[in-house]
Amino acid sequence: MDKPRCCKDCGLLGIRSRATRELVEVDESFREHAVIPTGNGGQLVYEGRPVCAVWAYDLPSEPLAPNEASVRAVLHKTRECAESVVWQRGFTPKEHIEMIQQAKLLEWQREREDADRKWREEQSARQREWRNEDLENGRRWRDEDQKTLRDCHANEIRELRANTRSNWIAAVIGCGAGLAAAGFGYLLANWPWE
């Protein structure tokens, strides 16, 4: 909801220079008493109608009688205005607009930096989670590999033991067969065949 403000208190209030048509700052005497500043010799340097620099209200189209009371009534009227900004003495409406834009830019940059910082923190947390998960997976895989290696080693030992028994049995059978063949050969050679 917009704050109720008077145009007289707003930094966007200005009057046009008759010479350059530039929107210039309205001094305190115009804001409070609707006295139009004059140049040397009492010449009017500015137009008598107030102007909102951002056209939040179309002040020139508001009915004004050619007197100070009418202008003062427009300037002192309470309005709901989203664009209103506190008047800072010595700054033109254009400079007030630039200050607003600068403040908005700084706010946008702050929000952007906050969002970026939050994103970086989230990414860092995710990386820590992934790193911890990788470490845990590596530990689990290493344990599984070691268990598999132990199982394979135990199987190899069992096979070697089985093979050792088989080799002894084969050696005994081989030796027995060799002795039997030698004995049979001896018998054949020494047997009286005649």
Image (spheres, helix red, strand yellow):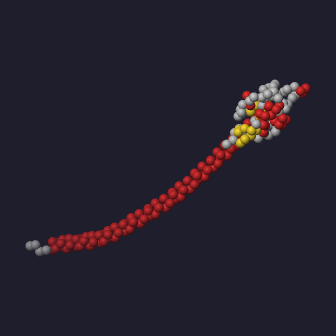
* Residue 123 image position (x, y, % from top left): 57, 51
* Residue 124 image position (x, y, % from top left): 59, 53
Q: Residue at x 10, y 72 (%)?
A: 193
Q: Based on the displayed image, in which of its 4 quarters is residue 170 positioned? A: bottom left
Q: Residue at x 81, y 25 (%)?
A: 18
- The answer to whether residue 112 is visible is yes
Give the position of the N terminus as an image quadrant: top right
Q: Does residue 51 lie above or below 108 as drawn?
A: above
How many discs mark residues in the rendered view? 0
* Residue 42 image position (x, y, % from top left): 89, 27
| Nearer to me, 140 or 114 | 114
Please give left or right for residue 125 compared with residue 37 in the image: left
| Nearer to me, 133 or 66 | 66
| Nearer to me, 58 or 170 | 58
- The answer to whether residue 182 is visible is no
Q: Does residue 69 lie above or below 134 as drawn?
A: above
Q: Residue at x 44, y 64 (%)?
A: 146
Give the position of the C terminus as an image quadrant: bottom left
| Nearer to me, 145 or 62 | 62
Which residue lies most toward the right here? 41
Please give left or right for residue 160 compared with residue 7 in the image: left
Q: Residue at x 84, y 35 (%)?
A: 33
Q: Based on the displayed image, in which of its 4 quarters is residue 102 positioned? A: top right
